[in-house]
Image: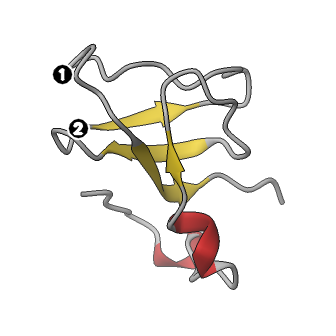
Amino acid sequence: MALYGDKANVKLSNQPTKYQRLWSPGDKPNDAGIYKCQTCGFEDLFNRACDKVPPCSVCKEKTKNWKLLVRAEDN
């Protein structure tokens, strides 16, 4: 579960469908942020330099999909 310490720096997205898409290992993610493995629940950060979604570092090759939880946004 993603947590935050400063409520002023998080907001509800006006693009909820962006958070429903499933990303498979090898896909190029559209956004930097925190993603959740849909196989084991592990959360990981994909930064702006990430050119393809990796397998989960916990469940490895069993990874089916990731889902975006928190998108990083530049001000």
Q: Residue at x 61, y 75 (%)?
A: 17
Q: Which numbered mark, 1 or 2, is in the foreground of this view?
A: 1
What residue occupies the far right of the structure in this picture? 75
- Residue at 28%, 47% in the rendered image: 38
What is the quadrant of residue 48 in the picture? top right
Label 1 sits on a secondary structure element that is loop
Task: Determine whether 13 is above or below 49 in the image.
Answer: below
Q: Earlier in the sequence, mark 1 or mark 2?
A: 2
In the picture of the structure, the residue carrying the numbered disc 2 is 42
Q: Which residue is mark 1?
A: 59
Against 9, residue 31 (above or below) is above
Residue at 38 percent of width and 63 percent of height:
4
Name the quarter where the C terminus is drawn: bottom right
Q: How busy is the neighbourhood of tag 1: few (under 14 within 10 Å), some, or many (20 plus)?
A: some
Question: Three-letter amino acid code at disc 1?
Answer: Cys
Between 15 and 27, the one nearer to me in the picture: 27
Q: Is residue 21 above or below residue 65?
A: below
Mark 1 touching mark 2, by CB under 8 A? yes
Cα distance in 3D space between marks 1 and 2? 9 Å
**In the rendering, at what x and y percent does residue 29 appear?**
67, 38
Query: Where residue 35 is drawn, which disc sits there?
Result: none
Relative horizontal placement of residue 15, taking residue 55 as reference (left or right): right
Dot 2 crowding, Cα within 10 Å, few <14, some 14–19, many 20+: some
Look at the image and tell me in which quarter the N terminus lies: bottom left
- For the image, the number of numbered tags is 2
- Amino acid type, callout 2: Phe
Residue 54: x percent and y percent?
Answer: 47, 19
